[in-house]
Structures are given as structure tokens and as C-alpha cells.
Amino acid sequence: MKKMITTLIGGCAALVIAGAAVAGAVESLRGDQELPDLSKEPAKRQQLVVRGGIERSYKLQPPVIPHEIEKDEINLKVNTCMNCHSEKTFEQKKAPKVGDSHYVTRDGKVQGTLSSRRYFCNQCHAPQVVADPLVENNFVGAK
Amino acid sequence: MTSGGKKGTFAVLVVGVVLGIALWGGFNWTLELTNTEQFCITCHEMEVTPYAELQETVHFTNRTGVRATCPDCHVPRPWIYKIVRKIRASNELYHHFVTGAVDTEEKFEAKRMQLAQTVWKAMKDTDSRECRNCHKFNSMNLEKQQSRAADAHDPYYWEAIDGKEPTFTCIDCHKGIAHSLPEGFDPTWNSPETTEQ
């Protein structure tokens, strides 16, 4: 019995050591960084500005953002995107108004102001950077 | 007049001039000392929120390495306006040492709308004079600006080129350029054509 327990413990220890050795050999996508460390900042790139907007790839796609958004703030207090994209200002700012869907609550009610479901714009709309595609392709959007 | 009397007057004059220079210099020296960012952020009220937020913006670090400091935007350069602002600033001393009006982040946020409105009004009244110490419509190259910016500036650029007073001023459209906007900011406040001025 005693012998069996010692073998068992020995076996377990061996497994743990072997496991650690194997884990050390695997390199995750984050590179050789320790888990608690922040990931390395990617190289800074300029944000892409395209007059007239960027073509959508499929219907109902949230259009990507054709301008810089570095200065914009979205937090509990303010949403500066709405300085230009709100129903009150879009005409003067020559900006497209947020889509009609942005005024619909989760119960399907249409309200006069932005629905809280659409408050965090960059959850769906992403800015673009000046960069060539990593892989060449001949994809054509929905138009 | 006796020659002794003449000497006396002269002495008084010399002493007066020397004293004048010393006082005047000392006055201007204090003025200069208190006109630095280092001085502004000796008060934690100014450091914790306004300075921290400024560091996130283009006026702190940018492509060209030109910086705007607190006095660049908040203290007038023409001497007389500077004095007026300094006298108003004694209100800040009072609130710092006596009332502690904004000595926590919470109190600062609660009062921010009022403070911001004071600044907006001052800038509107001076046609954004402090911004224009560095930026001018007629020095802008609209072709080099983002399309959004060029479209917005175009009419006022031409007004400035034609020697007219531009209909709108920088702060009409650029509120929130250096610090976070206060809670309750209405989107139309950066769209002067839609708001009654």
C-alpha cells in the first residue's frame, strides 16, 4: 500500500514537472510574454481618411469610420460622436445621421434620441488605418 | 532754485526711477513666474483633472512637437488683459485656500459645467484670442486638412482672406479641445449654426 502511494506521488510529480517543461516550450500568440504583462503596443499607424466614406462589404454592415477618431470621447458623461452625427446637428456638420436603427429600443420602440443599445459606437464602427492588406485578395463588396 | 535744491530733486528722481524699475521689474517677474504651467499645477485642483486630461490631447504631444501650456490658452498675452486675468485669479486663490470649492475630483466634476461655461464665454468674447496666438484661419492650408476639417473651415477661411471678421470663432466649434467635456454637454453647442448665438 505504502509503496503504491509513493509510486503514485512520484508519478504525479513527474507529470507535473514534464507538464511544466512542455508548457515552457509552447509559445502563445502573444509571444514570450508573461501572462500578467500588457501586450506590446502595435506599431502606430495613421488613421485613414476617405472623403465620401468607405464602401460597405455587405448589407447592414456597420460602415467603417472614414475619419480620425483620436479626439473623440465616449464615456458616461459625453459621446462626442453625437456632436456631428445626431439628429440635431448632422445637417450642419455635413455628416450622415446615425442609422434609423440607432433609435430603436430593445422592445422595438422608436424614440427621439439615441437608443442606449447604440451608445458605444466603436463597439460596431471601427476606424481604419493606412495599411496594405496582409494577404492580397479580390473580394468585391455588396455595393 | 539753489544748486542744493537741484541736487535734491535729482536724487529724488534717481531714487524714484531705481525704485520704480525694481518694483516694476519685481512685479513683472512675479507675473512671469506665475505664468508657467509649473505654477498652475502646484494646485492639485489644476493638476489632477485639467492637467491629466491635457496630456491625452494633441496639445501635449503631436507630430511637430509644439506644445501648448495652460497659460498659452488661459492667460492673455497683451499686458492689460493679463493683469485683469490675474486679478480674477485671486478668486481661484480664495476657493483653493478658503472654500475648497473643487478640491476633490467629485467636486470638480460637479462644478465643471459652470467653470467650462466661464471659459467658453471668455473665449467667445475675445474671438478665441489665445487660440489665434498660434492658429489663424488665413494661415491654414485647407488642402492639407482632413476633408471634414477643410469643409468646415472653408467659408471662414475665405472671410478671413477677404479681410472680414469670420462669422464664427474657434471655440464655437472646438469645445472640449483640451479637457473632457462636462456632463450634460449638448451636441448642438459645437454647431454654432444650429444654436441661437
Image: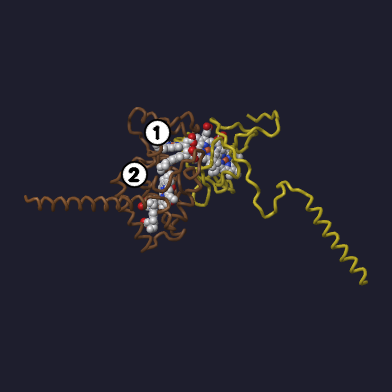
Chain colours: A yellow, B brown
For residue A112, above or below residue B151 = below
Q: Secondary structure at mark 2?
A: loop
Question: Could you tell me how far apart the alpha carbons at marks 2 and 1 are, in whole angstroms?
Answer: 20 Å
Which of disc 1 and disc 2 is earlier in sequence? 2
- Name the residue that disc number 2 marks: B77
**Label 1: how many Cα within 10 Å (few below 14, some 14–19, many 20+):** some
Residue at 65% x, 34% y: name it: A58
Q: Could you say where residue A17 lies in the image, as x and y percent from the top left?
A: 82, 59
Secondary-structure class at tag 1: helix
Q: Quadrant of residue B172?
A: top left
Q: Which residue does the image show at 48% across and 45% down from the upper left?
A: B60
Residue drawn at the location 76% of the way across and 48% of the way down: A27
Q: Tell me: A132 left or right of B172.
A: right
> What label does residue B137 carry, if any?
1
Residue B162 lies, with reference to residue B70, above or below; the image says above
Chain hosting mark 1: B
Q: How many marks?
A: 2
Q: Quadrant of the C terminus of chain B?
A: top left
Compared to residue A88, the image places residue B151 above or below, namely above
Query: Would you call the spot at circle 2 few (<14 residues within 10 Å), some (14-19), or many (20 or more)?
Result: some
Residue B72 in picture, x, y percent from top left:
39, 45
At which x and y percent is residue A39?
Answer: 66, 49
Regarding residue A100, the answer to whether it shows in the image is: no
Amino acid type shown at disc 2: Arg
Callout 1, which amino acid?
A: Phe
- Please state the chain letter of the residue tagged with numbered disc 2 in the rendered image: B
Q: Nearer the viewer, residue B197 or A97?
A: B197
Residue closest to the eye, B4 or A60:
B4
| Residue B99 image position (x, y, % from top left) | 37, 63
Q: Nearer the viewer, residue A94 or A22?
A: A22
In this view, B109 is above or below A66: below
